[in-house]
C-alpha cells in the first residue's frame, strides 16, 4: 500500500505548538494550497488542508515559520476520530508530516513576519489570492544565472524565454 502526500502551500496561521503529558512536541497547522485552475469567475480557489507534525521537527517548524510562510510538506494522510464534549463523534482527516522544506528566503520570511506583526492582514479565503506568486527558486535561479553568464537575472522558466537552461545533475532533487 502507498500513502504519501506532498504539498506546497502557505500557512494560514502560525503553527500551534503544544506538548503531550509525556513532553512530546506536536504542532498543528493548516496549509492553503492553490488549485491548478480558476473557477467560473476567474478566481483561483485554494484547498485548506490540516496537518500535524511531531517531536523536534514540530519545534523547528514552529520556530522557523509563521503565518503566510511558503512551505513544502511530505507525509501521509491519516484519519482519526474522537468523542467531543457534547457526546458527538468527530472525524478528522489530516496530513501527518514526516519532512518539510522552507521555500522562501530568510529575508522574505522576515519581511512577511514584520508585515504580519504590524497588523497587516492576509486574506486566505481563496478569493483573488494567488498563493503561488512567490518564486521559491528565485535565489537559486539568480545564482545559476550568474554562474552560467546570464547576468540579466531573467527567469529561465518564464513562458516567453526560449533560451537554453543549463542544469547539472547536482541541481536535481532525485
Image (tube, rainbow, N blue to C red):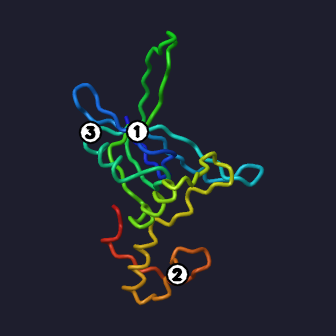
Q: Residue at x 41, y 31 (%)?
A: 78
Q: Quadrant of the C terminus?
A: bottom left
Q: Residue at x 42, y 60 (%)?
A: 103
Q: Are marks 2 and 1 in contact (CB under 8 Å)?
A: no
Q: Earlier in the sequence, mark 3 or mark 2?
A: 3
Q: Which residue is mark 2?
A: 154
Q: Please name which of the two marks, 3 or 2, marks the residue nearer to the observer.
A: 3
Q: Quadrant of residue 101?
A: bottom left
Q: Earlier in the sequence, mark 2 or mark 1?
A: 1
User: Callout 3: helix, strand or loop?
Assistant: helix
Q: Are marks 3 and 2 in contact (CB under 8 Å)?
A: no
Of 30 and 40, which appears nearest the observer? Answer: 30
Picture layout, residue 167 above or below residue 42:
below
Most extreme residue toward the left, as rendered?
A: 22
What is the C-alpha distance between the residues marked 2 and 1?
38 Å
Q: Which residue is mark 3?
A: 55
User: Callout 2: helix, strand or loop?
Assistant: loop
Q: Please name which of the two marks, 2 or 1, marks the residue nearer to the observer.
A: 1
* Crowd band around label 2 with a 10 angstrom C-alpha radius: few (<14), some (14–19), many (20+): few
- Is residue 5 left or right of 23 when viewed as pictured? right
* Crowd band around label 3 with a 10 angstrom C-alpha radius: few (<14), some (14–19), many (20+): few
Q: Residue at x 45, y 87 (%)?
A: 150
What is the C-alpha distance between the residues marked 1 and 3?
13 Å
Of 78 and 151, which appears nearest the observer? Answer: 151
Q: Which residue is mark 1?
A: 16
What is the C-alpha distance between the residues marked 3 and 2?
41 Å
Amino acid at each position: 500500500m502507498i500513502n504519501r502526500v506532498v504539498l506546497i502551500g502557505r500557512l494560514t496561521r502560525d503553527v500551534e505548538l503544544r506538548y503531550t503529558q509525556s513532553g512530546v512536541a506536536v504542532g498543528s497547522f493548516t496549509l492553503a494550497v492553490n488549485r491548478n485552475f480558476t473557477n467560473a469567475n476567474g478566481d483561483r480557489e485554494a484547498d485548506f488542508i490540516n496537518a500535524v507534525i511531531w517531536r523536534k521537527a514540530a519545534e523547528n517548524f514552529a520556530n522557523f515559520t509563521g503565518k503566510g510562510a511558503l512551505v513544502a510538506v511530505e507525509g501521509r494522510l491519516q484519519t482519526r476520530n474522537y468523542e467531543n464534549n457534547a457526546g458527538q463523534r468527530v472525524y478528522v482527516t489530516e496530513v501527518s508530516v514526516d519532512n518539510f522544506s522552507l521555500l522562501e528566503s530568510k529575508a522574505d520570511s522576515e519581511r512577511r513576519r514584520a508585515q504580519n506583526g504590524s497588523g497587516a492582514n492576509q486574506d486566505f479565503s481563496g478569493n483573488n489570492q494567488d498563493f503561488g506568486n512567490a518564486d521559491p527558486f528565485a535565489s537559486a535561479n539568480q545564482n545559476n544565472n550568474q554562474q552560467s553568464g546570464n547576468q540579466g537575472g531573467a527567469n529561465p522558466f518564464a513562458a516567453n524565454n526560449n533560451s537554453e537552461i543549463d542544469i547539472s545533475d547536482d541541481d536535481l532533487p532525485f
